[in-house]
Amino acid sequence: MSDMQTQTGEPLLRIEGLTKFFPVSGGKRLFAVNKVTLEVGKGETLGIVGESGCGKSSMGRTILKVYEPNEGKIVFDGKDITKLSRKKMLPYRKRMQMIFQDPYASLNPRLTVGDIIEEPMTIHKIGTPASRKAKVQELIGVVGLKPDHIRRFPHEFSGGQRQRIGIARTLALEPDFIVCDEPISALDVSIQAQVINLLERIQKERGLSYLFIAHDLEMVHHISHKIGVMYLGHLVEYGDADEIYKRPKHPYTQALISASPVADPKSAREKHRIILEGEVPSPLDPPPGCPFSGRCPHVRDECRQILPDMYDYAGRKVACLQYSPKAQGITLQ
Amino acid sequence: MTETELTRKLLPEEKNDEFIAIESETFLQAAWRKFRGNKRALIGMVVLIFVVLAALFGPFLCPFSYETQLPEKNAPMSLLHFFGTDKFGRDIFVRILYGARISLSVGFVAAIINLIFGTLYGGIAGYVGGKLDILMMRLVDIIYSVPPTLYVVLIMLMFGPSVTSVMIGISISSWMGMAQIVRSNVMSLKEQEFTMAAFVLGAGDSRILIKHLLVNTMGPIIVTVTLMVPQAIFTEAWLSFLGVGISAPMASWGTLAQDARSLIEVYPMQTVFPMLAICITIFAFNFVGEGLGTALDPKQKH
C-alpha cells in the first residue's frame, strides 16, 4: 500500500474551495459541497467517507462537472477545468471517469454488454469498428467476464458482474482518474471483495488514481492512501489513511471510527463507543459556526460562532477549533 | 481489525465459473415470446393482417369498382354480391374493401405523424426540462382545450373536404397524448444513473436523448401508436357519419354507415356491415395494443 504513496510534483487533481449549492424553493440554498480543498496524486487513492447526505457523491459529480461548480477551482493535471464548456471538456472526459453506485441503474437495459463497453470509444471516435470490437474483447477479459457475455443484456447478470461491466466501460477510455461513487455499497460482502480486488489490480497495472467514495470506513481504510472525512458538505479531516484511521482527531471522525464494527468480540468489548446525540442538522439550515457543533461532545461556546478552517495538526488537516493554532498555544515565529 | 484479518476477508478471488443458463434474448425476442402467449393479442394480429391484406389486394379480385352502379339496387346478400348492393346498386362488399383502404390509411398516417411529432416534442420537453418544458406543456394544454372535432371542421373549411384534410385534422388534435407519455418517461429516465454515465462519457444531447432515453421508452411508444390507429379510425368514421368527413363517391366506413342510415328501417344490413368492419378492426387493434403493452413491459415476465 505504501509503495504507491510516493508522489512527486503537481497532483493529478486538485480542487480548491469547491462549492456546489442547489437552489431550493423559498430562495434558500442547499450547500451540498462547501469550500472543499483537496488533492489526489498520481496512482493514489483518496477515500471519502461520511454519512448519507453529507455531500460525498455531490462532490464526486461536481468534480466531473455533472453539476456545474458554483465556486472554487478544479485543476486536473495542471489545467483549470472549472469553466470549460461541455465541448472543451471532451478531451478531459477521456481521462476522468466515474464508476457508479447502483449497478442495476447505471447500465442502459436496452444495450448489449458489447455495445455498452464500446459506446465510450464510439463517442470519442477511438479506433476503427474492428479495433473497438477487439478492445471490448480485451476489456471483458480484464474485468473477468467471458467473451460470450458480450452479446448479452445487463439484466442477465448479477450485481457484481454488472459492476464489472461498468468498470470495463470506464476503462475503455483508459482514464487516469476515476471517481468511484460508492461502487460496492449495493453489492454483497463476498462480491465487494471481488470488485475491490479488481479495482486494486487495475490501479497497480495502470497507475490510476481513484477518488473512492464510500461509507464503509474499514473498506476505505483498506483501499485508500489518504482519507477525507465529510460532514454536512464540509471536509472536516483530511490526511494519511492509516493515521486518520488509527488516531482520528476530529470529534466526528472519532465518533465515526468508534461506531465501525470490530470482528474480534474481545476487542469489541473493550472498545469505547462514542454515541452522538441528536440528528444530522438539515443542510438547508446548518448551525452557525462549526457544522458539527450541535452534536459534538467537546463543544465550546466559540464553536457555535466560528466556522473552523482546516488546521494543520499531527500531520493532517482538521477543521476543529481545538486544533487551531490559538488553542494549541502556538505563536507565529 | 488488523491488516491480516482484512486481507483474509478479501481473499476469495473471483471464481471464473459464472455462466448464464438461460438463452440470451434480445428485448424484441422476449417481447415476441410474451406476445405469442397472449391468445387475444394473437387473434387480433391475425385479424389485422387479414384486414390489411383485404384492403390492399381485395379490390383487384372483385369484378366491380366501388362506383360501378349496377341495375339491381338494394339487392340482398348473394354469392355475386356478398353483402348485397346499396340504393344506387353499388356492391357493398367492394365498397367496404375500398373503405378499409381509406379508414386504415387515415389511422396509420395519423399514428405515424403522432409518433414522429409527439415523440420528438415530448422527448425534447422532458429532456431539456425547466422553462422550455413548462412552455411546451402549456401549449399542449391549450391545444387540448379545443374540442378535436373543431380542428377537423376548421381544416375542412380551409383545405376543402378531402382525405388529407381529415388526416391533418385528426393528427393535429391527437399527438398530445404521445407527447405527454414520452415526456414523463424521459423525465424519469434522465434521472437514472445510466444517463449520467452517458453524460460523463461525453455523449452529446442527441445521443443521450435517442440512444438512452427514447430507446428505453420504446414500449410505451409502440403501445400508444398501436392504440392511436383505432382511435383515428374511430374519429374519422364518426366525422364521416356526421357528414363532415370524407365525401362521395369515395367512401370510408363511416360514410358507408351514413349512406345506409336513411334506409335503416328497410335494409338494416346495409348499416350493419360497415359498422361491423369498424368494430372488428378497432377490437383487433385494441387487443394487439393491449398485448404489446404487456409484452413490452420488462417487469412482466409472462
Image (cartoon, coloured by chain):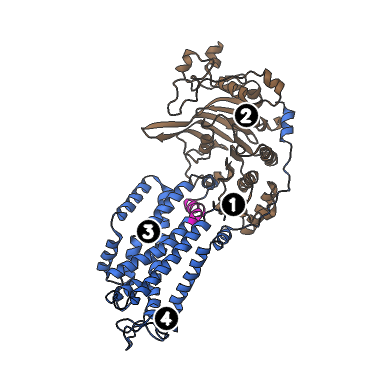
Relative height, residue B164 to residue B9 (above, below)? below
Q: Which one is in front in this view, the residue at disc 4 or the one at disc 1?
A: 4
> Which amino acid is tagged 2?
Leu
In the visual, does A40 lie left or right of A20? right
The colour applied to the residues of chain A in this rendering is brown
Residue A10 horizontal/vertical position (percent): 60, 33
What is the secondary structure assignment of the residue under circle 2? helix
Q: Are marks 3 and 4 in contact (CB under 8 Å)?
A: no
The chain letter under disc 1 is A
Residue B67 horizontal/vertical position (percent): 33, 83
Q: Which one is in front in this view, the residue at disc 4 or the one at disc 2?
A: 4
Question: How packed is label 4: few (under 14 Cα within 10 Å), some, or many (20 or more)?
Answer: some
Query: In the rendered structure, does residue A33 fall within the stretch colored magenta?
Result: no
Tell me the magenta residue range: B204-219
Relative height, residue A124 to residue A185 (above, below)? below
Who comes first in sequence, dot 1 or dot 2? Answer: 1
- Looking at the rendered structure, whether the residues under marks 1 and 2 are on a common chain is answered as yes
Q: CA distance from mark 4 to mark 2?
A: 77 Å
Q: Look at the magenta stretch and give its main secondary structure.
A: helix
- Looking at the rendered structure, whether the residues under marks 3 and 4 are on a common chain is answered as yes
Which circle marks residue B59 in the picture?
4
What is the secondary structure assignment of the residue under circle 4? helix
Residue depicted at x 53% and y 29%: A37
Which circle marks residue A116 in the picture?
1
Q: Which residue is mark 2?
A: A217
**Outermost residue, left side:** B157
In the visual, does B3 lie left or right of B284? right
Which circle marks residue B101 in the picture?
none
Question: How packed is label 2: few (under 14 Cα within 10 Å), some, or many (20 or more)?
Answer: many
The answer to whether any part of residue B252 appears in the image is no
Q: Nearer the viewer, residue A322 or B101?
A: B101
Q: Which residue is mark 3?
A: B175
